[in-house]
Image (cartoon, rainbow, N blue to C red):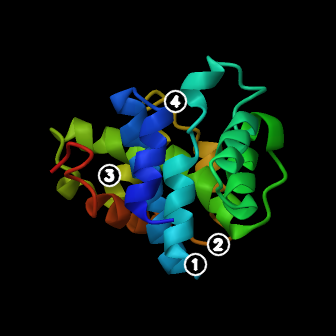
Amino acid sequence: MERSAAIALLSRYVHEPGLTKHCLATGAVMKALAGRLGGNTEEWETIGILHDIDFELIGGNMEQHGIKGEEILRGEGIGSEIAAVVKRHNHHLFAGTYTDPVDIALQAADSASGLITACALVKGGRLSEVTVKTVTKKAKEKSFAAGCDRSRIALIEPLLPLPEFYAVAIGGLMEIRGELGLS
């Protein structure tokens, strides 16, 4: 699925601008990770963009998150490979079951996209000033971007050392910084 089609599909189900930006950011990190880990960049980006497609519909019911997303995607004609990854990304239901690189990457990208964006906001919205050192330091501060689950980010370590992961993630976000309202 082309990026523009994934964004159009997302916009049919997600209307909150902050959630849309989060999905775009996760997609950018996933695309960068696919390039580094030998995955399909278009597919991984699509997974990142669509991973929270059901979030507004489920109204906070985390027992349905991902499951409803898979239903939506299958109903929209999206292949089972993408839809299944979206389903499994709900760590409340599937924690401890991640072995495929795409599943691991989505866990890390989902949380790291928010952490890195928060680092940029502290720097006046200048993502260009966020470094691996910045992210590493801020990740150690539990109160900073408290909603970003560091244990989900750490799942990437068997595939990439954290500093390298942060560098890849920052690079991915830099590609779409304008869409995220960052410089």
The kind of residue tagged 2 is Leu
Q: Quadrant of residue 100?
A: bottom right
Residue at the limit of the structure toward the bottom, as seen here = 38
Q: Quadrant of residue 4?
A: bottom left
At label 4, which amino acid type do we have? Gly
Q: Which residue is mark 2?
A: 159
Residue 30 visible (yes or no): yes
> Residue 150: x percent and y percent?
58, 43
- Distance of label 2 from label 1 (alpha carbons): 8 Å
Question: Badge 3, how many Cα within 10 Å: few under 14, some, many 20+?
Answer: some
Mark sitting on residue 134 = 3
Q: Which residue is mark 1?
A: 37
What is the x, y in percent for residue 96?
A: 83, 49
Name the foreground residue: 56 vs 117. Answer: 56
Q: Please tell me which residue is depicted at 75% across the width and 28% down the height of the picture.
A: 64
Give the secondary structure at mark 3. Answer: helix
The residue pinned by badge 4 equals 147
Mark closer to the observer (2, 1) = 1
> Between marks 2 and 4, how big is the CA–CA gap?
23 Å
* Label ID, residue 62: none
| Eye-nearest disc, 4 or 3 | 4
What secondary structure is found at the residue carrying circle 4? loop
139 relative to 159, above or below = above
What is the C-alpha distance between the residues marked 3 and 2?
22 Å
Q: Residue at x 58, y 38 (%)?
A: 149
Lower position in the chain sequence, tag 2 or tag 4: 4
Measured as percent of width and height from the top left, residue 32 is found at: 44, 69
Pair 3/1: label in front: 1
Residue 154 versus residue 181: which sits nearer the camera?
Answer: 181
